[in-house]
Image (cartoon, grey):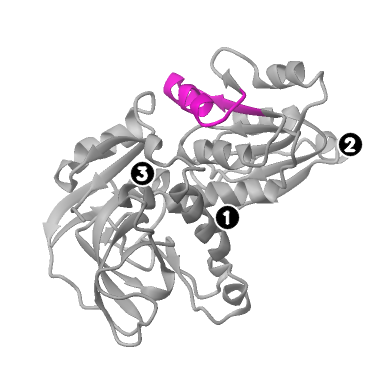
Amino acid sequence: MKSLVLEEPNKLRLAERPVPEPGVGDVLLRVVCTAICHTDLFTMEGGYKLGHPTVLGHEFSGIVEKCGPGVRNVKAGDRVTSFGFASCGTCPACREGWGVMCPDLRALPRELEGSFQEKMIMPASSLFHVPATMGLDEACLVEPASCAYNAVDKAAVQPGETVAVIGAGPIGLFAVQAAALRHPGKLIAVAKHQNQRHMATKLGATHVVDVRKDDPCEVVDGLTQRRGADAVIFCAGGEQAWKQASRMLGIGGRFVVEAMPPTGTEQWPVAVMDFTQKVISYIGASSYSANQFSAVIGLIDSGKIDAKSLITQRFPLDDYEEAFRMAGKAKDRAIKVVFEISEE
């Protein structure tokens, strides 16, 4: 089988490797579609310290080819998508559906090899069935859509409120859609690129801000008669965006942090007077629960969340160099880049 192997930072190679055998509780998947995430770019460039060689990719869908001993929830031929991690299934966090908080968490591509290959091993407990009415290209985006859905859940958006989404990459655009389902009075998307602003409007934003031309804080003040936003979903990693997000919140506002900083080592400042006098709540959002993941599958299948429109480029695995270039350097043209590895 073909595997896109990260041999060392910034060195990818398409290699022929043996097809692995599933162990107890595992399945062998034939990968159909897998998307490039910002964290894949970050990891490729050495941002995360991994053992090498390894295979990146954690947003994927595919067909079960073979089940290992003890697998009962899926069978050969099933169409599936998956968490971007595996957990023990028995600890308190797992029993509550929050496997991402498991002390024995195994993440892709840290402890498990990822999906940038023709076939992969995945624990069956991490898999979810994909409805027959849903495309596997859409299904590979359930994982990032679930991250955004969790962030909006954390914000506890109420009907009629003003919500600002900072950053309109894939997570931000999924957050716009998840927030729109809660019927805010104003839903403001802050973005750098025209394609992102156009997409945000298409997907439910009532207002968009070109951050390169306008101060988003002034725009929010104008739209709310200086009351400020009730909630900010922070989906863009940068100190300038961070400062703007806290400024645009009103009294009692909720600041949900979904984005990761550019390197993972930054310490972003908190304006203490804003924090205390405005009674701002800072809320971290990490991944998703099993219930949220399942809900997002249903929302995409029903058309209430549009995943397909976010796929702007599709490549075979052989064209990985151009795919990574588009995902990393052409954000004015690319939103989500997907590898189409095999057919159903």
Taking depth in this image into account, of 156 and 324 the one nearest to the observer is: 156
For label 2, the SS is helix
Q: Is residue 150 left or right of residue 62?
A: right
Q: Position of residue 168 (x, y in %)?
A: 51, 32
Residue depicted at 29% across the width and 58% down the height:
115
Amino acid of disc 3: Leu
Dot 1, how many residues are within 10 Å of its Cα: few (below 14), some (14-19), or many (20+)? some
Which residue position is annotated with label 1?
Answer: 286
Above or below 252: residue 187: above
Q: Magenta residues, as a range?
A: 187-206
Dot 2, how many residues are within 10 Å of its Cα: few (below 14), some (14-19), or many (20+)? few
Q: CA distance from mark 3 to mark 2?
A: 39 Å
Q: Is residue 309 left or right of residue 192?
A: left
Above or below 220: residue 153: below
Label at residue 277: 2
Sequence-wise, which precedes: disc 1 or disc 2?
2
In the image, farthest residue toward the top: 213
In the image, farthest residue toward the bottom: 70
Above or below 133: residue 126: below
Quarter residue 255 falls in: top right
